[in-house]
Image (spheres, grey):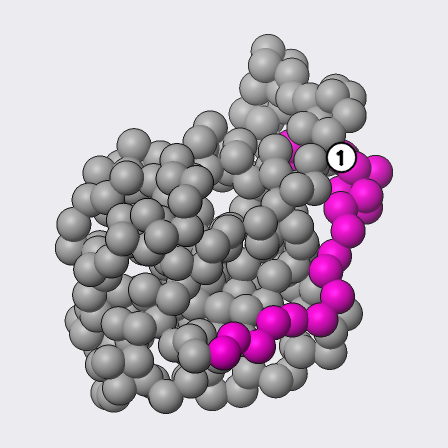
Amino acid sequence: MLKNFLLDLIFPRYCLGCQKELSYGVENTQICGDCFAKIRLNRGFQYQKKSAVKVIFAAGRYDDPILREAIKSFKYQSIESLKEPLAKLAIDYLKKENLAGKFSGFVITPVPLTLRRKLNRGFNQSELLAKEIGAFLNCPVVNLLKRKKFNSPQAEIPDWKKRKENISGVFEVRLRGIFEVGLQLLPNKIILIDDVSTSGATLEEAASVLKKAGVKEIYGLVIAKG
């Protein structure tokens, strides 16, 4: 606690929304309570037709300026403390939609990063979110996927077709993840967690790989949808 107090004294933190200086012990992350309350939660969810992903649940919209800035700071500035308010948005959304008790028997799987990106960033943001959400849903978090090749960031590619081509073939099932959490078989029902879905190409590619491996039902949960 003393370390955090001294860091705040030397390197004051400012809210990503209103730029107000944040007080240690009151706001322990980068979004003040007032700005967090301004982020609007989505209503409902999207059933996917002809897709490996049955439903996509999105807590908010990526065009929300505060939410977009929080996600960008989480990913690209490695502000790890943002995992808590961002995961809380997803949890609040699940509560609002009466979904909190609907995932008994599900396993949560984060969308993986390449080792290079994970080392550069210091963490996989989707994995941190998955752990927070998994604790709330009482679902085990299993790293069932890995990236077998490096690809350009999806955010840098505006065209949907090129996004699909860029992400094609990058994932493979990581069966070792099953045994690491004491499971004996590939789970039948999975929630894929990612921070953002714009075109849906990443979730679709990851889900397709899991489907081919034998997973029956796959749902996507993201913090924001573009």
Q: Is residue 164 magenta?
A: no
* Image quadrant where residue 159 sits: top left
Residue placed at 66% from the left, 42% from the top? 63
Residue placed at 42% from the left, 76% from the top? 51
Q: Name the residue carrying label 1.
A: 32
Residue 88 or residue 75, whichever sits in front: 75
Residue 165 vs 121, above or below: the answer is below
Which x, y percent locates residue 172? Answer: 20, 65
Q: Residues within 10 Å of mark 1 (few under 14, many from 20)?
A: many
The kind of residue on which mark 1 rests is Cys
Q: Is residue 48 magenta?
A: yes
Which x, y percent locates residue 147? Answer: 22, 55
* Image quadrant where residue 206 sits: bottom left
Residue placed at 79% from the left, 37% from the top? 35
Quarter the N terminus occupies: top right
Residue placed at 67% from the left, 28% from the top? 16
Residue 179 or residue 226, whichever sits in front: 226
Which x, y percent locates residue 192? Answer: 43, 67
**Magenta stretch, overall SS:** loop
- Magenta-drawn segment: 28-49
